[in-house]
């Protein structure tokens, strides 16, 4: 195997050194499994040759971008070869006149946006990891981010893909057009598939004009219920804010206790933004949002127009993850998503679960699209806490599903949530998913052991 | 036989604190070059986690992996979880040496001990600036003295032009770098430097090298120095310079001067006085990318180190389109000059060197006019 892989990618693009494989045994979740080797292909042809070889010899292959996944999605549960696409990082084409960009899978999200910004354009989905996350990884997890409510997720921007199929064939699917109903929408099948159906090597993305102005507001509420009302009233007002974030009481307290950010004692904070191409447009939208925020009994409301004030208002939200990561050495960060009006129920329910098991859960996230991030804080070296953390997570998943929600809004299922797939998907759907997997990947070599597909 | 590593409470906490978000990938100069996760801070924190948990045996090649770090501190500055990976790397290098894994810097330590400099040079350039007594003592450091003589010559000329009453000493390596690569400072060399510097009766020690600056300022071995220590950019910031350039000028923050010592504004204050057409690189100040020379990386991996410098230099050129790149660190200067390709038109100087050149240009112009 070693000889063949080196023959395909070259000595410099191959490793089976233990110290190099150890970092490839992890992502940002708690799952740990060792690969047997890792390769850094430099072209689609090399990926094709690797997969062909792997399929012939039934060796698992695991496509990997920046490895920022929070679900174990890129952790090689059955060993095998990591296909790290980081060196395939060329922006192949920026076609402003046709509103698309064509990139290799390893292009970093922010690098693409820096290039697009030169033309006044943007690829809108902005996961928190956008400084490092790769477009291939974004597609494989259908990455979202803060602007999901207004601008959608990665899925809404993928026009076409080039994919190496598990059986060692190269496929182009999709189009370069804004519309396309030609054949099955196979590209969509690979979006959010977490690398279980093939290796995405090239992506054609729809791009948007970059909004020129934005206005920010922050409102704090003594009662969570009021914040919840403010959110869904805003989302049904006719205005869709580009940002609608919520931070719960535990998160706010943690920020207040551990930073010098001045925050009132509140059950919830809402951070919102409106954006557009003229100030008039931005302000008119904000006026509507502010009137709703006001009538729901806020403790206080702050607004910002210039960049300095904006950054100030963003401070609390931006420091949420970091503060919680400092408070506790280990944490699990989930991404349950519910219909927007059920957010207060989800937040209250999470706190009840948290109290029941004596485990701190701080929740913040994208209220505008119902996608919340409960961050479960515990100590990974304390077996009792680990057990309670798992129980908390399980109950949160059950709660989200009972509210007509989903296990995952933007992180994916991976290993961590695989056991809960049947909670959300009925036997017919599970069976169809498994049949699709088997049809495309008869030898089960492509990122096996994930999302309960190969049982 | 090498022994196993010990992890104290502080290290255990730091290891657990890393959330493996991998945001450090965006700022690690060696990862940027290689795309190898082990090169990155999170990769190294993972190795430490497994070493601590007894899952990974400490081998020669694992110990080697910890040499692949320039200790530029960009990961630390950008870590959302508040981990200081470069401090861990430096500390682990020592622990690994302690556990019996000597590295190639053992030889450098011996060279420093024997020759008083990191290169094993036997002859020291005589700058002709040694006096009995002076209010200021100037300390150059190894890289400037032995690898960037021309630049140093200009810096000295600038001090002459500005009529600074300074002296130089028979300096030996400050030897602080050994602390970063697994070993310890050479106390006898530190003492020699202290004695030589104190003999001059100077009240202020001026260093051109940011690393020497940090060692004199921070290392306990120099606590009895008894002089005010200033980096040359701090010393010069209030001077009036009678020169200017119209050229487009940019500035590279040396990691040892910026992130490690917090000196960002002084060099800029000087540059603003002489170069109205000053542009910042995209990644600058706290976020400046490393030139690849620090933390023993150039010593251990010379070729890769130059490739890192090439990356940084190309980015600066692309971002700014500047005619002149300034910095104030002999190591950064040296690495950039080695990295510069012929077709790249940018000129690279230490700030003090550039100032001296501007004075020279002015003098030549005045002569011509006369």
Image (tube, helix red, strand yellow):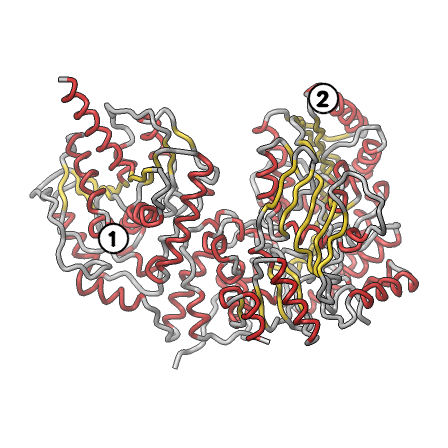
Q: x and y percent of residue A173 in the render?
A: 76, 52
**Closer to the camera, B357 or B114?**
B357
Q: From where the camera sits, is residue B304 visible? A: yes
Callout 1–callout 2 Cβ contact below 8 Å: no
In this view, which residue lies farthest toward the left?
B132
Query: Is A156 positioned to the left or the right of A263 in the image?
Result: right
Query: Where the C terminus of chain A falls, by quadrant?
Result: bottom right
Q: How crowded is mark 1: few (under 14 residues within 10 Å), some or many (20 or more)?
A: some
Q: How crowded is mark 2: few (under 14 residues within 10 Å), some or many (20 or more)?
A: some
> In the rendered image of this protein, does residue B206 appear above or below residue B300?
above
Judging from the image, what secondary structure is the residue with disc 1 in? helix
Residue corresponding to mark 2: A283
Residue drawn at point x = 37 percent, y = 72 percent? B98
**Closer to the camera, A15 or B213?**
A15
Q: From where the camera sits, is residue A256 visible? A: no
Mark 2 belongs to chain: A
Of marks 1 and 2, the one in the foreground: 2
Q: x and y percent of residue B131 in the render?
A: 8, 42
**Closer to the camera, B93 or A112?**
A112
Judging from the image, what secondary structure is the residue with disc 2 in? helix
Query: Is A384 positioned to the left or the right of B57 in the image?
Result: right
- Give the label on residue B222, or none: 1
Residue drawn at point x = 86 percent, y = 61 percent? A423
Q: x and y percent of residue A20 in the render?
A: 52, 67
Q: Quadrant location of residue A230?
A: top right
Q: Gap between marks 1 and 2, in whole Å?
A: 60 Å
Query: Is B244 positioned to the left or the right of A341 in the image?
Result: left
Q: x and y percent of residue B255 in the render?
A: 39, 47
**Closer to the camera, B336 or A7?**
A7
Please give the count of numbered marks on the rendered protein: 2
């Amino acid at each position: 195997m070693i000889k063949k892989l080196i023959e395909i990618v070259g000595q410099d693009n191959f490793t089976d050194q233990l110290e190099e494989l150890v970092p490839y045994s992890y992502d940002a979740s708690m799952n740990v499994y060792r690969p047997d080797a890792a390769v850094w292909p430099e072209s689609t042809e090399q990926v094709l040759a690797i997969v062909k070889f792997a399929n012939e010899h039934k060796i698992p292959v695991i496509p990997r971008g920046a490895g920022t996944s929070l679900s174990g999605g890129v952790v090689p549960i059955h060993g095998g070869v990591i296909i790290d696409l980081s060196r395939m990082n060329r922006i192949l084409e920026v076609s402003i006149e046709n509103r698309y960009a064509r990139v290799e899978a390893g292009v970093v999200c922010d690098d693409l946006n820096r290039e697009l910004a030169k033309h006044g354009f943007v690829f809108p989905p902005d996961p928190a990891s956008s400084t490092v996350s790769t477009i291939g990884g974004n597609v494989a997890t259908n990455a979202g981010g803060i602007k999901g409510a207004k601008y959608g997720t990665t899925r809404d921007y993928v026009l076409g893909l080039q994919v190496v199929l598990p059986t060692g064939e190269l496929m182009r699917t999709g189009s370069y057009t804004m519309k396309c109903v030609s054949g099955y929408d196979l590209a969509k099948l690979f979006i959010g598939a977490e690398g279980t159906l093939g290796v995405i090597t090239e992506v054609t993305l729809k791009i948007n004009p970059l909004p020129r102005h934005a206005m920010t507001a922050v409102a704090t509420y003594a009662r969570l219920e009021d914040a919840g009302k403010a959110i869904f009233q805003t989302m049904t007002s006719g205005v869709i804010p580009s940002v609608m974030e919520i931070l719960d009481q535990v998160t706010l307290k943690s920020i207040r206790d551990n930073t010098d950010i001045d925050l009132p004692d509140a059950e919830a904070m809402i951070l919102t933004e409106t954006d557009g191409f003229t100030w008039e447009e931005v302000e008119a939208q904000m006026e509507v949002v502010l009137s709703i925020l006001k009538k729901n009994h806020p403790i206080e409301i702050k607004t910002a127009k210039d960049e300095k004030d904006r950054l100030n208002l963003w401070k609390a939200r931006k420091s949420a993850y970091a503060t919680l990561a400092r408070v506790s050495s280990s944490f699990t960060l989930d991404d349950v998503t519910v219909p927007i009006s059920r957010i207060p129920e989800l937040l209250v329910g999470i706190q009840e679960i948290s109290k029941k098991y004596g485990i701190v859960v701080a929740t913040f996230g994208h209220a505008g699209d119902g996608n919340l991030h409960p961050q479960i804080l515990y100590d990974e070296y304390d077996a009792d806490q680990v057990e309670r953390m798992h129980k908390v997570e399980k109950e949160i998943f059950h709660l989200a599903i009972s509210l007509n929600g989903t296990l995952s809004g933007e992180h994916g299922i991976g290993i961590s949530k695989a056991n809960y797939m049947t909670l959300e998907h009925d036997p017919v759907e599970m069976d169809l998913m498994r049949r699709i997997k088997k049809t495309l990947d008869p030898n089960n070599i492509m990122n096996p052991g994930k999302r309960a597909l190969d049982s | 036989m090498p022994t196993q590593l010990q992890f104290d409470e502080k290290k255990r906490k730091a290891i657990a604190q890393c959330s493996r978000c991998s945001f450090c990938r965006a700022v690690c100069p060696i990862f940027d070059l290689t795309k190898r996760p082990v090169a990155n801070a999170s990769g190294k924190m993972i190795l430490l986690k497994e070493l601590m948990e007894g899952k990974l045996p400490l081998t020669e090649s694992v110990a080697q992996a910890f040499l692949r770090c320039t200790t530029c501190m960009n990961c630390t500055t950008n870590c959302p979880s508040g981990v200081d990976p470069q401090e861990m790397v430096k500390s682990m290098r020592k622990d690994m040496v302690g556990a019996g894994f000597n590295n190639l810097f053992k030889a450098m330590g011996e060279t420093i001990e024997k020759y008083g400099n990191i290169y094993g040079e036997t002859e020291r350039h005589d700058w002709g600036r040694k006096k009995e007594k002076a209010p200021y003592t100037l300390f150059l450091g190894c890289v400037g003295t032995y690898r960037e003589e021309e630049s140093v010559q200009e810096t000295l000329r600038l001090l002459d032009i500005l009529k600074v009453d300074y002296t130089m000493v028979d300096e030996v390596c400050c030897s602080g770098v050994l602390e970063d690569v697994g070993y310890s400072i050479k106390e006898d060399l530190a003492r020699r430097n202290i004695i030589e510097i104190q003999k001059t009766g100077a009240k202020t020690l001026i260093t051109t090298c940011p690393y020497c600056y940090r060692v004199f300022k921070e290392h306990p071995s120099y606590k009895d120095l008894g002089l005010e220590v200033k980096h040359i950019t701090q010393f010069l910031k209030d001077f009036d310079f009678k020169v200017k350039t119209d050229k487009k000028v940019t500035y590279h923050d040396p990691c040892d001067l910026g992130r490690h010592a917090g000196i960002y504004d002084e060099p800029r204050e000087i540059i603003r006085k002489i170069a109205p057409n000053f542009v910042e690189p995209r990644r600058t100040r706290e976020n400046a990318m490393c030139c690849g020379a620090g933390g023993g990386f150039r010593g251990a991996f010379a070729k890769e180190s130059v490739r890192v410098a090439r990356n940084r230099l190309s980015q600066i050129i692309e971002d700014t389109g500047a005619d002149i790149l300034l910095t104030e660190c002999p190591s950064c200067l040296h690495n950039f000059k080695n990295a510069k390709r012929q077709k790249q038109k940018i000129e690279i100087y230490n700030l003090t060197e550039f100032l001296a050149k501007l004075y020279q240009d002015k003098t030549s112009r005045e002569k011509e006019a006369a």
